[in-house]
Amino acid sequence: MKNIFKALKFSSIFLLVMALFIACDKDFNTIESDVLGKDNANFNTNNLNLQILAYNKKLDSLQINNLSSNLFGVFNDPAYGLTTASIITQVTPSVSNPNFGDNPAIDSVVLKVPYFSKVSADSPDENGNEVYTIKDSLYGGAPIKLTVYRNNYFLRDFNPNSGFNETQRYFSNASSTMNSALDGNGVINFEDHKTDVIYEQDQYVPSSQTIVLKTTEGDQDVFDRQTPALRVHLDKDYWKTTIIDKQDDPVLSNANNFKDYFRGLYFKAEAINGSGNMVFFNMANANIVIYYSKDSTIDGDRLQDTFTINLTGIRLNTFVNDFNIALANGNKIDGDERLYLKGTEGSMAVVDLFNGMVDCDGTTETALDCFKKTYRKLDENGNYLPKVNGNYPLKKIINEAHLVIYEDETMPNGGNPDYHKYDRIYAYDIKNNAPTIDYVFDPTEDTSDPANSKIINLGQRITDDNGVSKYKIRLTEHLNNILLKDSTNTKLGLTLSTNVNLTSLSKILESADEVTEVPSTVLLAPRGTILYGNHQNVPENRKIKLEIFFTEPNL
């Protein structure tokens, strides 16, 4: 594993590096000094577990344009049920005002949509060729029906409701039975705007095979090996009429005219027998290439040329959910027994670390004030001592703090005990719609391997010998900022993430709730998980909790 350690201009960098060694272990170990001896130590080290409030937030109408990648296909989650993901995208020619020459004739037309692949551990093969895998971006393996239509709905760049001063956002409508989206004015049903069938395949399953193309140069065969992709041939006559015959027509004169003439493609996924597969499409590198020949002006031979149409511009990921769990907003007073984390317009959890009133040494205080009084130094009147160099003096020093979350072991897994093995939970600040400070301070970013990235802040799933699985979210800096600098205690959002390196956000359409944006990866997480909450009906050894390890000087 190659970790990328970013330069951090913080005084706590040494502590963070030490924390890395702790986080890489299965759990915390108790270490006693063999220099001072237990009786001679100047500190009392203990841990304090605080019960917190956690509840569900049902997700609706999430922004589905400007996503980092796109899901395509059908996935049947063992716990939640079926999700179908389709894609609508604009297309843009690589050049304007093309000159196709004299007597142009199409040799072939190829649509190519790459998958997200990496070199397999089995690479190279016996012939020395690279072997690839797409297992990290493929969910399920049953065939689905794939149809690519010409889309006739015009995707706007700007929102007319804002006087065309803001970009147009499109939002999910996953409760519908049709591939549709919301634009703030109404529902766009893309089934009503599909026209020509560009391509169809009744038994589509993504392949990790290397694409090998052979050409002949003279008497030599030349092989071009390409990474795995959906690569198919399209009808030549259709593209001659649609593109080649439009030479000198204004529709090819610029990108805007073209987008109005050819408004895009609609990649539609359909389940076969209630199952299927779902894969990440690398649409940023997808294209249609027209290979054609034309007369030469020199020696009478035919010349080979290409015209490329890139699948770029506005792109939407539509979702249709047929869940067998009725997702709903949770109980903000008592918390929920189960927390449902599900992507593709599903559900998330909200955590309030210091909720309500508590008994604090015989007086009724807010949980937050009690926390501060427990850790800060007080004068004889019970008031906080003045700040020193911008920080409140502490009587107890927090060494480590984690949000500990247990997985529901009764959750269906489709008979695969390792189904949730590589799940990652992402925590963010829902008030400021930003990563937590512990995330920012975490130097263990691995851009090539998200499963092993940010492992100090976003602890990996741990399963003990009894089969109990849990997650730890590090909040040490978050709590220290509250104690030392009196920073605001904001609620945290918990979501399942396929890539914890991605922190971009998607807006919620006209949200009247405290959650106004969610991490975009919420839309790109096909799997879901179920966690224990903190409701009184949850067993004590499974409740979500805030675990604090602190040092108290004996001075």
Image (cartoon, grey):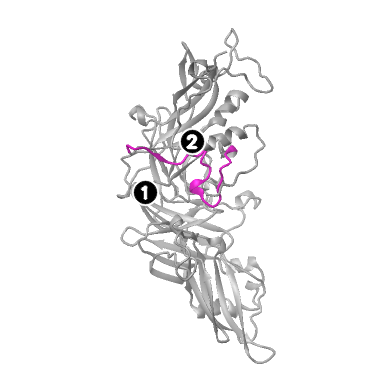
Residue at the disc numbered 2: 473
Quarter of the image for the C terminus: give it. Answer: top right
Q: How far apart are the two marked residues, 2 and 1, measured between alpha carbons?
A: 21 Å
Of 538 and 265, the residue lying toward us: 538
Region of the chain picked out in magenta, as a range: 441-466
Residue drawn at point x = 55 percent, y = 48 percent: 446
Is 425 placed above or below 317 here?
above
Element assignment for label 1: loop
Q: Disc 2 or 1, which lies upstream in sequence?
A: 1
Is 5 placed above or below 53 here?
below
Reply yes or no: does residue 276 show up in magenta. Answer: no
Q: Position of residue 153 (x, y in %)?
A: 52, 62
Residue at the disc numbered 1: 419
Residue 429 in view in this figure: no
Q: In the visual, does 73 lie left or right of 254?
A: left
Number of marks present in the image shown: 2
Is 302 placed above or below 74 here?
below
Q: Position of residue 173 (x, y in %)?
A: 45, 51
